[in-house]
Image: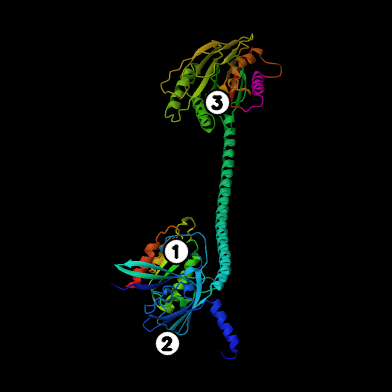
Amino acid sequence: MRGLPAPVAHRLNALMVQERAVAWLRIGADLTLLDAGGELDHYGLTAICRGEPVGEQALFLEGLLPLFESPYVVPSIGLTGDIAADVHIHEDADGTWVLLLDVTAERDATRRVQQKAYDMTLLQEKEALLNRRLEAVNAALRETQRELEASRDLARQELERKQLELAEARTLQLALAPPPYRGRIGARAVAVDVVLEPAKEVGGDLVDHFRIGNDMLVFLLGDVSDKGAGAALMMARTHALFRGLINRPDAPWLFRAPENAVGLVNRTLAEGNAGCMFVTLLIATFDAATNRLTYTRAGHVPPFLRRCGGAVERLGAAGGLPLGLSEDAVYASAAVTLAPGDEVLTVTDGITEAMDQSQCLFGEERVAGVMRRGCVAGTSLLQQLLAGVRAFEAGGMQSDDIAAVLVTIGTS
Amino acid sequence: MTATLQKKICMLGAFSVGKTSLVRRYVESVFSDTYLTTVGVKIDKKTVDLAGRAVNLILWDLAGEDDISALRLSYLRGAAGYVLVADGTRPATLDVAMSLRGRVEADYGPLPFVLLLNKNDLAGQWAIPDGDMDGLRTNGWWPRATSARTGEGVEEAFMDLAVRTVR
């Protein structure tokens, strides 16, 4: 070797052979193995046979021979026993030479570095993938949040619109209740007081009173079978139907015997009553010419009659089914004579079925008790009744619509 | 008796797509979750029977390509065909496979090959859009979904390639 003293060259040669586990093959032009030597066992070439095709004995040579360029190097081929070798191939006049040099240590060192780099890269890829997925989820969540906020705003606007509509409906419904009356029916002084307090924005109780001619006062109180907007519409319809009878030529006949008016209204209400709603009703006509109170009670709470002496009676005669249930329902009336100082109170079940904290009902007897005590100075009987109900409920929520009408026959 | 044929088949693809696992599944019918990177090339042999003739497939499992070390195309010298492998959970590895195919064809001409979309057992993490698969089929690549873990599609893919290398 040029420039190297022979001892150095020999030492280098020895190191190469020792550390690189050199093995060699010599191959003929017919691709058979001519000769072999060196550390063949190190590379798993133990059963190698001279004179046999080399391709089947050294698999790593498949496709490489005949050599297309010389020298040719195939680096770091993994062989039997996890040994790695650089394969150097060259040609000369004696054939094709294949040298195997062990590079297992270098391969392992490279593998350790490469392994860490790939592991790190894979982690970064997973992190990037997770970040993309998180961003996608976040974007979807933000979109969902925007949709929810938009839906909430729409719902709020819709709620406000409905609340406004209900407030207007409440105003209109309360306007259907007539103001108190102080005046004469025929020659008789009569006072009429009313109360209407829906449990919700609108309710299903109705109260009304009106005159027919000079001598008749008609008052009525009803309770629709449900509460809320549907009941309010049913209440308004019932109210309008009775009001529609006032100006008919036969109005005196209809109301003198109120079962006639009730029969007409019932038929109209019962026709096509898809919701099966019904109305309990008390309608009464006071005829000042006879001092007779003729009433029809269609499933309603019996009115309370307080005689001027303080005794309380119930007007419990049955007049027929609640209105709206059957077109063929038949109604009847009963009559009672009123004297000056008598008072007739009619209530809905919002009063009799008001509940205290232990779910006990106010009851009809408590109403009768208020009637018996009569007016206390400065407070009307209706005011006393409502105050009694509120005290009984003790701050609890009003569970049902409340309506009442009080008719007082004057002494003059 | 007919002499045994030998065909050199190279495994190509990005790093960590499962090339070594596919070879181990095919040759040894085993799978390991442990990822051990390949340096240089690892050679295995699988003898198959093609129409009554034994064919030795010499499988060159090449180190995966990455941003730093490019594939040594010299490893493909004398190859009869190659297996392109991509990881179905990592779309970028499909780009690497397509790039490799172009470079191999530029140097060695149109060799038979099969394209494997590996790790099909990780269906929940599959990230290659159906549109990309359709595009590959339109270009005549006919990708195969495989799983070295379960063995799904592995035997069929190698056999398909082996048949095409001896035509």
Looking at the rendered image, the quarter that the C terminus of chain A falls into is top right
> Quarter-wise, where is residue A117 in the image?
bottom right
**x then y, percent, for residue B2:** 29, 72
Q: Are marks 2 and 1 in contact (CB under 8 Å)?
A: no
Give the residue at mark 3.
Answer: A206
Q: Relative to A261, does residue A163 appear above or below in the rendering?
A: below
Q: Relative to B64, does residue A185 appear above or below in the rendering?
A: above
Looking at the rendered image, the quarter that the N terminus of chain A falls into is bottom right
Label 2, label 3: how many angstroms apart (C-alpha)? 125 Å
Q: Are marks 2 and 1 on the same chain?
A: no
Q: Relative to B66, does residue A339 appear above or below in the rendering?
A: above
- The amino acid sitting under disc 1 is Arg
Local SS, label 1? helix
Q: Are marks 3 and 1 in contact (CB under 8 Å)?
A: no
**x then y, percent, for residue B14:** 49, 68
Badge 3 density bin: few <14, some 14–19, many ≥20, Cα 10 Å? many
Label 3, label 1: how many angstroms apart (C-alpha)? 89 Å
Local SS, label 2? loop
Q: Chain of mark 2?
A: A
Give the residue at mark 2.
Answer: A94
Magenta stretch: residue A398 in it?
no
Local SS, label 3? strand
Which label lies toward us, 2 or 3?
A: 2
Q: Chain of mark 3?
A: A
Give the residue at mark 1.
Answer: B24
With A350 as the anchor, is B60 left or right in this view? left
- The amino acid sitting under disc 2 is Asp
Label 2, label 1: how many angstroms apart (C-alpha)? 39 Å
Q: Nearer the viewer, residue B99 or A284?
A: B99
User: Which label was assigned to residue A73?
Assistant: none
**x then y, percent, for residue A6:** 58, 88
Magenta range is A380-397
